[in-house]
Amino acid sequence: FPEATIQRGILEKKLKHIFTETDSLPLSISKHGIRVWTKWENSSMLALSEAKFVPHHPNEFRSVLKDFSENFPKVNPMCETVINLKKEGDIREGVKSKIKFPFPLSDRLMIHWQYTHLDEDQDEHLVMFSEDGNDELLKEFHGEDEKK
């Protein structure tokens, strides 16, 4: 999957560069060891988050990140489901997530690529989600009943 490998490399490079810019980005959330920044590139919004849960060691979350699709709905009450759609080697996996919002907001269905890179550096783990290049996933897995 050479295209997926290239896409993953581009995303990782972009993410690492954006982390060097966090001092100049608007901080959306900052509490309990979690910080979230937002950055706009043309009409695309990038959300960048960092979680530093002290006293927990990052490897305590490794199994949660490894099986993210199974574990995320268990820890986030807004997430109804995360379904694994298709895998492209060890590079990326197509996933469909259904997020429940309170009335009057509509629920959100997200179909995107998930790039999981455990042990990026020693004790550092990276999970990236991207809708870039997900046209194939949308054609194959976005049902007519979901488009309403």
Image: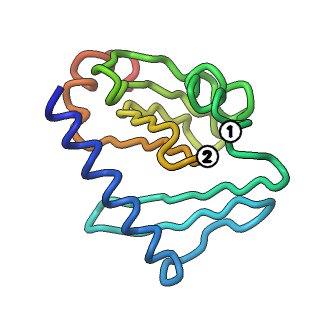
Horizontal and vertical percent for residue 43? 28, 63
Query: Which residue is the extreme one toward the bottom?
Result: 24
The residue at the point 25 percent across, 33 percent down is: 134
Can you identify the residue that label 1 sits on? Answer: 59
Which is more toward the observer, 121 or 87?
A: 121
Say which amino acid is labelled 1: Asn
Q: Residue at x 63, y 33 (%)?
A: 62
Q: Amino acid at mark 2?
A: Asp
Q: x%, y% of residue 117?
A: 45, 38
Quarter of the N terminus within the rendering: top left
- Residue 72: quadrant of the picture: top right
Instruction: Give left or right: position of 32 versus 63.
Output: right
Instruction: Find disc 2 in the rendering and name its residue.
Output: 123
In the figure, is residue 62 to the left or right of 37?
right
C-beta proximity under 8 Å, tags 2 and 1: yes
Q: Is residue 12 above or below residue 113?
A: below
Question: Residue shown at 71%/68% (left/top)?
Answer: 30
Q: Residue furthest left?
A: 2
Viewport quadrant of the C terminus: top left
Give the image quarter of residue 40.
bottom left
Q: Which type of secondary structure does the marked residue at label 1 adopt?
A: helix
Choose the circle earlier in sequence order: 2 or 1. Answer: 1
Q: Is residue 1 above or below residue 41?
A: above
Q: CA distance from mark 2 to mark 1?
A: 6 Å
